[in-house]
Amino acid sequence: MKDVDAILAANAAYYRAFAHGDSAAMGRVWADDDVSCIHPGWPVLIGRRPVLKSYRNILGNPNRERIEHREDTAMIFQDEGRVMCIEIIGTADEAVVLAATNWFRRIDGAWRMIHHQASPIAITDADLAPDPPPQLLN
Amino acid sequence: MKDVDAILAANAAYYRAFAHGDSAAMGRVWADDDVSCIHPGWPVLIGRRPVLKSYRNILGNPNRERIEHREDTAMIFQDEGRVMCIEIIGTADEAVVLAATNWFRRIDGAWRMIHHQASPIAITDADLAPDPPPQLLN
């Protein structure tokens, strides 16, 4: 499998563990060491134990929101790689859109997550149009 | 200089460039390649050019808020390292508190920023107390 396909598969496995409420699978997604996580609205959690504990709490909630991931973009450099993506939490008109960074390290040939951070997007790509169109003076 | 001191100095240089509104210094903080940034509320920006353009716009605003960084925590693995910290934006009772990840790569001996993401903290450490204290039954 190509590097980029492998890291995108690891990213998909993260969201699949979420969708299935599968804490054991989530444990396999994350690396053993050098782990950090910033859930939306949370302060940073550092270390595998507090991070996986937070996921057990989140995944154990039967009323947790659905999360979809879109626009996955992989950036790989040697044995470090990240997938930037959009998370859509909830459904239809109540959905919240987040910008997420999922950082992986290649360990014994497998991409394991070492960092996750998701933050709400308040402005859209259209708001970021880099320059105003040239003004017509006539 | 020890690795951890060097990466903390690179992190401090980022906030110093911010404080001084110094786009040239900000350009030296960031790496040339493999760069991404998620400002609070923004979608992801990928690539040195759009990232530095966003900083020029932010730093060029004379009314931009002050940012303090606190609780800097470095995590280093080989030539990759990140500093997790708290950002306090604004002053006194109007301050907003963010959880920030500043990711660096050691390139030609210098720690250069390859990723920044900051997200508002809505809950406090106290809300995250891992377990309730044992209940007294007598």
Image (tube, coloured by chain):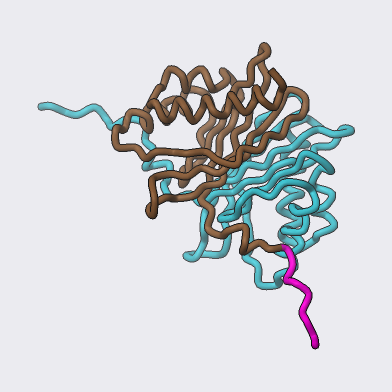
Chain colours: A cyan, B brown
Q: From the viewer's side, name the closer residue of B69 and A29.
A: B69
Residue A5 on the magenta segment: no
The x and y percentages for residue A77 are: 71, 24
Position of A8 relative to B57 (above/below): below
Residue under the point 72% across and 46% down: A46
Give the prevailing secondary structure in the magenta stretch.
loop
**Residue A92: x percent and y percent?**
51, 64
User: Which residue is the extreme one toward the front?
Assistant: B138
- What residue sits 31% from the left and 33% below the top? B61
User: In the picture, residue A3 is in which quadrant?
Assistant: top right
- The location of residue A137, given as percent across then percent down, is 12, 27
Q: Where is residue B27? Give x, y as percent.
A: 48, 19
Work out whether residue B11 or residue A121 is closer to the camera in this orientation and state it: B11
Q: Point out the residue furthest to the top here.
A: B108
Quarter of the image for residue B117 reads: top right
In the image, is A87 to the left or to the right of A9? left
The C terminus of chain B: image quadrant: bottom right
Q: Quadrant of the N terminus of chain B?
A: top right
B47 sits left or right of B107 in the view: left
Whether A56 is drawn above or below B40: the answer is: below
| Residue at 36%, 30% in the rendered image | B57
Give, as a single range, the part of the protein colored magenta: B130-138
| Residue at the bottom extreme, as displayed | B138
Q: What residue is rendered at 66% in x and 25% in y?
A: B5
Figure quadrant of residue B31: top right
